[in-house]
Structures are given as structure tokens and as C-alpha cells.
Image (cartoon, helix red, strand yellow):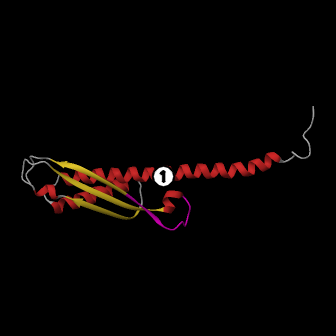
Amino acid sequence: MRSRGGRERGSASVEASLVVPAFGLLVALVVVGGRITIAHQVVESAAADAARSASLQRAPGPAHDAATSAAATTLTGQGLDCASTTVDVVSTGLGGPVGDDSTVTVTVTCQVSLTDLTFIPGLPGTRAVTATVTSPVDRWTQR
């Protein structure tokens, strides 16, 4: 059997030193992408819960309060830590006459810290994650 020549000695180490960091970066990008996707899903779930809660109310004021409370409960329950949260409620459908089709639309915006998304301590900045959901109002509920 022939042994390797002197020119190839250590080439596996050089190859590994080039491939391992690239593979690590690829894995990190997949993890960050997954975290961003999970954050979007949680915010969409919060918007759906908020829209449903708002659509069960009879007036715009209580609808906004119910939507804000439902969104906060869902975000906290799912473990998403928002630097700031905004809940916008379009509840004009609650003012219509009984028997008319109407809807309530809720938009939830969560400012997520980049540190929470990437697991890199001290990374400055936030990313806005927004979801909008429309829920029907029961047409026969007294408004």
C-alpha cells in the first residue's frame, strides 16, 4: 500500500476548517428563520383570538378592551416577549342594525427583540411582526 504524499498531509484539517463554519452558519440561519416563523404564528394566533373576542362584544369600546386583553393573554401564554404591542381594532360593524352582516378587524403588531429571535446576547434592535384577522359579528346579537 502506498502512503499519502507529503503534499496531501493535513488537507482534511484544512477542508474541515472551511466546511464546519459554513455548515454552522447554515444551521444558525435555519434556526433564526424558524424562530421568526414561530413569532409570526404566535402573533397571528393572538390576532385571531383578539378578533373573536372583539366580535362577541356589543359596542366598540368594550370590543377594543376585549381584543387588547385577548391578544396580551395569547402572546404571554405562547411565551412571545414583545418589547411593545399594538392592537388596532376596526369595529364599525358593531354599530350596525341587527340582522346586517358585519365584521370586526383586528391588527396586532409585536416588536420582538432581535436577541430573542437570534439567541445572540446584546444584539440591538427589534423586528415588527404584524398580523391582521377579520372575524364576523353574529348578525342576530343585539348591538
Left or right relative to 126: residue 54: left
Question: Residue at the location (74% across, 51% down)?
Answer: 17
In the rendered image, residue 27, in percent from the top left (x then y), is placed at 59, 49
In the rendered image, residue 94, in percent from the top left (x then y), is placed at 13, 56
User: In the image shown, does 136 or 8 lie closer to the viewer?
Assistant: 8
Give the residues in magenta.
119-129
Q: Is residue 27 magenta?
A: no
Which three-letter amino acid code belongs to the residue tagged 1?
A: Arg
The N terminus: image quadrant: top right
> Around disc 1, counting alpha carbons within 10 Å, would you say few (fewer than 14), some (14 to 19), or many (20 or more)?
some
Q: Quadrant of residue 3?
A: top right
Left or right relative to 4: residue 96: left
The residue sitting at the front extreme is 7
Q: Quadrant of residue 84?
A: bottom left
In the rendered image, residue 120, in percent from the top left (x then y), is placed at 56, 61
Q: Is residue 121 magenta?
A: yes
The C terminus: image quadrant: bottom left
Residue marked by disc 1: 35
In the rendered image, residue 112, in percent from the top left (x then y), is placed at 43, 61
Question: Residue at the location (49% across, 59% down)?
Answer: 116
Question: Residue at the location (62% across, 52% down)?
Answer: 25
